Amino acid sequence: MRRKDREITDRAEILEAIRACDVCRLGLVDGEYAYVLPLNFGMDVDEEGGLTLYFHSALEGHKTELLCEGCKASFEMDSRHELEYDEAKGHCTYYFESVMGRGTIRILGDDEKMHALELLMDHYHPGQNAYFNPAAMPRTLVYSLEVEEMTGKRKMPK
């Protein structure tokens, strides 16, 4: 990272930055180009500190054609956006927090879908045990990204 003064090195702070995000952009390989998807997500941190991100989609489509058990993917998410513009000085800057990383995709079996979807719902409705209709489960693909490495960065007002 070029700007070491902006790097988030504390893992707990990186996880808090992730919790503040609404969208995770997942990057998949599509021939010679990257295929970037803005997705809703859920997350789980295991007892050893490993991070897993969860996503869902329809059972068909271009995205699902690119997803495969064990394929590699990258991700990016950001939040806490704030533009600061000083017209008199002709100065503009932007505040943010972001997390980037990579890992391996895993397609979840029917026995794992419910837990993953509960985590996804909890990300957007924390502590509410929000209801979702289980009738959609047979037509829903649920997959995870087992995060292997990640970095965090922030620029905040002083």
Image: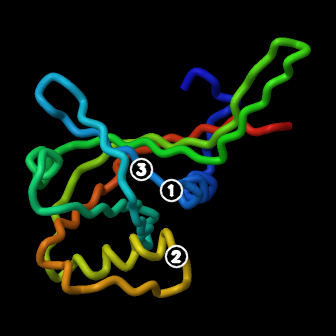
**Residue type beneath disc 2:** His
Give the residue number, with chain letter if any, for mark 3: 24
Q: How far apart are marks 1 and 3 (CA)?
A: 7 Å
Question: Marks 1 and 3: CB-CB under 8 Å?
Answer: no
* Above or below for 52 versus 126: above
**Residue type beneath disc 1:** Asp
Q: Which mark is residue 22?
A: 1
Looking at the rendered structure, the secondary structure element under dot 2 is loop
* Above or below for 127 versus 35: below
**Residue type beneath disc 3:** Cys
Looking at the rendered structure, the secondary structure element under dot 3 is strand
Relative depth, front residue between 151 and 76: 76
Residue 90 position within the rendered picture, expressed as x and y whole percent measured from the top left:
82, 12
Q: How many labels does the image show?
A: 3
Q: Earlier in the sequence, mark 3 or mark 2?
A: 3
Residue 119 position within the rendered picture, expressed as x and y whole percent measured from the top left:
40, 74
Instruction: From the viewer's perspective, tell me whether residue 56 is left or right of residue 79.
Output: left
Q: Which residue lies furthest to the top in this view?
A: 90
Place residue 15 in its image quadrant.
bottom right
Give the residue number, with chain letter if any, for mark 2: 125
Q: Earlier in the sequence, mark 1 or mark 2?
A: 1
